[in-house]
Structures are given as C-alpha cells and as structure tokens.
Amino acid sequence: LQVLAGLVPVAFVIATSAVVSRVPGAVGHGLHSAEWRALRDALLVTGGLFVLEQLVSPFQFTIAEALAWRVDDALRERILHASFLPVGTSLLEEQQSLDDLTDVVDPTRGAGFTAGSACAGLLALIARYVRWATSAVLVGVVYAWWAAAALALAALAVRVGIRSGLGRLAAYERSFAPQRRRRNYLARLLTHPSAAKEVRIFGLVPWLQARFRTAALDAVVPVWKVRRRTVVRPYVLSVPLSLVLSGLVTVAVARAAAHGDLTLGRLAFVLQAMLLIGTLGQFFNECDFQTELGMSSYEALRRFETAAEQQAYAPAATPADVSGAPRDAIRFEDVRFAYPGSARRVLDGLDLTIPAGRSLAVVGLNGAGKTTLVKLLARLVEPDAGRIAVDGIDLRDVDPEAWRARLGAIFQDFLHYELSVLDNVGFGAPRLVGDRERIGAVVERVGADEFVQTLPRRYETTLARSYEDGADLSGGQWQRLAIARALMAVEDGAGVLVLDEPTANLDVRAEAAFYERFLDLTAGLTTILISHRFSTVRRADRIVVLADGRVAEEGTHDELVAAGGRYAEMFRVQAERFGAA
Ligand code: ADP
C-alpha cells in the first residue's frame, strides 16, 4: 500500500504532462479528431489517478492506526511482564526506571507517540522515498541525469537537516522525564479522588494550579528554547543549497525548452517532478514525531526490561522445597539493609528467630524498621548482608512465588479493592476466589458476616460508592475484611501470617482487642504482629523490641516487664497515657 501511495502521485504527474502535451494537437485538429480523443483519454486517466490517490490515503491512515495498536498491545504485555519480573519491588522505586516507565507507559496510554506509531511511521516513509526516487529517475530518463541527481540531492539535504535537528531535540527532551513525572503527578492530584478531601479542605486548588503551571513549563520551556536553534539551524544551512541546485535545474530546463530540445509534455513533467522530489525536504506529519519519539519510548522499554531482567529470579536447578514451611523456624541471621540511595542502615546486624507455630510480636517506635523486616521476609527487598533462612534454607534459593504462597500479610495501607466483598476476601487465595462457602465461613469467623448481610447486595456488593448498589465500609469493617483476606491465605495453605499495623487507625483498646481476637483465630499458626504500641500485643507468645536496627530486648510480656528495660518503660508510658493500665 505504501509503495502504491508513493507511485500514484508520480503517475498523476505523468498523466497531467501527457494532457499538456496533447493540448496543441487537439486544438489544431478540432473536436472530432484522433488528437482530441487522445487528449480526452489522457484527461480520463488523470481523473482516475486523482480518485485513486484519494482512495489510498484513508487506507494508509487506517492501516497505520491498526498496526500501531497491535504493536502497542504487544508492548503493553511486555511492560507488564517486565514489571513483575524482579523478585522485589525496589526497581519500581528507582529514579531511572520511573523515568523510563513514564516514557513507555504514558505514550501507550494514548498521551504521545508510541513504539507502535513509530512502526507505522517507518512504513509510511516508504511512500515518501518511493515518490522521491521514482520522480528523480524519471527526470533522469526524460531530461538529464545531472538534473535528476541535483534535485534528489537538494531535497535530501533539507531532509537530513530536519531529521538530525529533530533527533537532537528528542534526545534533549528525553532528559526531562523527572520534570514530566512531577507535572503528571500534580495534574493527578487535581483530579484524583484520593486527594479530593485535602485539596478542598486546605483550599489547595490555586496553589496546585500555580505549581502545575510551573512544573508543566519546567518540562517544556527549556525544550522550546533549544527547539528554535536545533530545528531551524539545519534548515538555514540546507535550504540555500537546495535553492541553488533547483534554481540551476529550472534555468537549464527552461533554456532547453526554449531551444526546442525539450517537448512541451517533457517540460511539464520535469517541472512537476521537481515539486514532487522537493516534498522529501519537508517535515513528515505521519512519520517524523512518531518514529523519533516512538523509538525513544521503545528504548525506554528496553532499558526497563534489561533492569528488570537483572533483578529477576534465576531458578536453581533443583529449587528448594518450602511446602509446609516453616516447620522449625524462620531465622534472620546478621541481616543488614539500607534502602537504595540511603546511607542509613535500617537493619544493622539483626538476629531474630521466629519459631514455627507460635506468635511473635515485633514492637518498636515509628521508623524502627518493622515494616522493612516484613518486606525482607516477603522478599520485596533483599538484604545487603546476612541471610534469612526458613528451616535452614536460605530464602535466596527459594522460588519467590512458592515462598509468598506460604505467606499472608496485611499491611497498614492494605488495599480497599473497589470490587465485591467476595473478591476483597477471596484475593487472599486467588485459587479460591469463587468458593463462596469457604469465603463465607471465614467472614463469619472474623465476625464480619453480620454487616455484610446488611449490604445492598450482600457478598456481591461492590465496596465503593461510585458503583450502582455499591457501599463503602467503616475503617473497622475494612479491617475485618482484611483479616478475612489473610485467613483465606491460610485456607489456601499459607503457614505464616503477618499483621503489619492494619489497626493503626484504631484506638489502643480496640487494637488490643483486635490483636487478641486475631491470636485466637490463628492459634497454632506462625504469626507475626507488628505494632508501635507496646501495650497492645502482650498476649503474643514472644515479644521482641526493635531498636537501632536490631533486637534490643526479647521475652514474654511478663519477662520484659520484670526486666524493667525499654519495653517496661514504653509499656508503662503508653498504657498510662491511654488509660489502659
Ligand atoms: P516502621 O515500620 O518501624 O515504622 P519502616 O520499616 O517503615 O519503619 O521504616 C524504617 C526506615 O526506613 C524509616 O526511616 C523510613 O523512612 C525508611 N524507609 C522506609 N521505606 C523506605 C523506602 N521505600 N525507601 C527509602 N527509605 C525507606
């Protein structure tokens, strides 16, 4: 199709030249002569070619669009695959990969030029170059080869200038990914429901608008500034050369025609072909941004994939078997960890034993590293030194998916899925998502069945008010469903359950009651309860106090109180303050 699209305009020019060459004969011989019929035929062919050209261009557009969609669909799959390739989540927090993701994901969401549109644009170049080359060859055949070469070169010079300027501009623009990320974030704040409350209460709109404006300009103004220089300079250099060459050819053609060396038809052809050849020296609307920026987007995807592959799990020849683990204990052995880009060690020589089948509470002040400990346990991040072993097997030798199947964890910021109650609970065990009976039984066990029965569509109710028959829950109700979710993981074979302060918005007494209920429900399982409140976890089998990146104290509640150390002090202060003593 692209070759056809390139050839039709050339054929059109040949046909119009034939029309021009036949006019004198037709005029001389009158309406019923053979010359008149020849002119008429040439006109009909010209008309036919005109119609063909009109037909081809919508097809060119549609096919380019379809091609871009197919390629982009495939790339979306690749983004998804690469995002889940790394064992942990730290790649998704790194500057470089966030920049790369902005460059890949934004365009594929329809906000820019995608790799798919680059493919379509690349094919569209065929039409442009076929037109240029065939016109030039025909000028050589019809008139003179030196003229053909001069015209082709003149157009090519302008073209190279435009493309190289565009290339430099795009390369420069690529370095503004962090600014674009900031701009997009501010734009989201203005429209995203999660920010709606604060934005209104604090009257942030004018501030956000001003900041968005600044951020948006920060992302583009430097590019605009160099744009003039980068894009215009090559023009200034190449256009005079092009003018001189085309001027020479025009004069030579005119003189040849005046001397009778060139027939009227050939003169008409060469003059029109000059214009056709010259169209190569343009900005191509259907190709240039697409190929330049679309390829950048693809390069960003390649960088992201490479980084993801480096962090992917390399399966061992005989992967360690952790089904049924932990039977004995999970051990943190001299574990050290600092977040990438930070010098401060969150965990610094942590030794901790988590015995199987018992409950362990980890307490410590905010920022002590409790959540980090859980992330390490789930292999969302990897230790810098030391090792984590389950029943003596280093976690690094275990397939992360197999290990995570053994874990159920509810974090402080657990997800409120805008989906049905069944899904919200069933997600603890995706294999059991359709098992209404087991989900119902677990919901009853956590004492949530009562309020679920009052929802408009009971277990089918979508938990968001933005849906028909949807409902939102209170914080406490959400927490119960979250616990049910964790228990579903147990239903599907998880052996370790972690509660990482999903109760932070409860008061002390409610948190204590909640944890006690949880301990009752999970007796006999390996459970880890996390809290910054020392007074809510005293029923755990064992309590460790995390401070300065390691275990500062450990024992049962009574032992720790008797020891009169940090735990005893914090317990007394916090219990008194909340009147729970
Ligand atoms: P806790 O759960 O005990 O409150 P965390 O484990 O969440 O503490 O955090 C421990 C320290 O690590 C804090 O100083 C926190 O600022 C830092 N931190 C937590 N998450 C990240 C992260 N993703 N990147 C960099 N630093 C982090």
Image: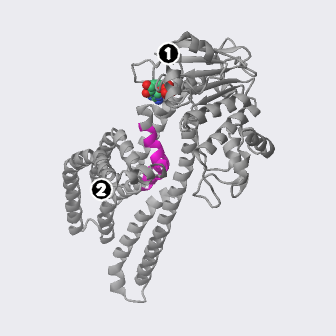
Give the labeled residue for mark 2: 144
Q: Is residue 97 visible?
A: yes
What is the magenta segment's predominant secondary structure? Answer: helix
Residue at x 76%, y 21% (from the top left corner): 324
Residue 288 place in picture, x, y as percent? 38, 51
Residue toward you, 561 or 4: 561
Q: Amino acid at mark 2?
A: Ala
User: What range of the chain is rendered magenta?
Assistant: 99-127
Q: Amino acid at mark 1?
A: Arg
Residue 444 place in picture, x, y as percent? 76, 42
Residue at x 43%, y 81% (from the top left corner): 40
Residue 473 is covered by the magenta coloring: no
Location of residue 80 (image quadrant) = top right
In the rendered structure, which disc, 1 or 2, sits on the residue that comes first in sequence? 2
Query: Is label 2 in a helix, a strand or a loop?
Result: loop
Mark 1 is surrounded, within 10 Å at the Cα level, by few (under 14), some (14 to 19) or many (20 or more) other residues, namely some
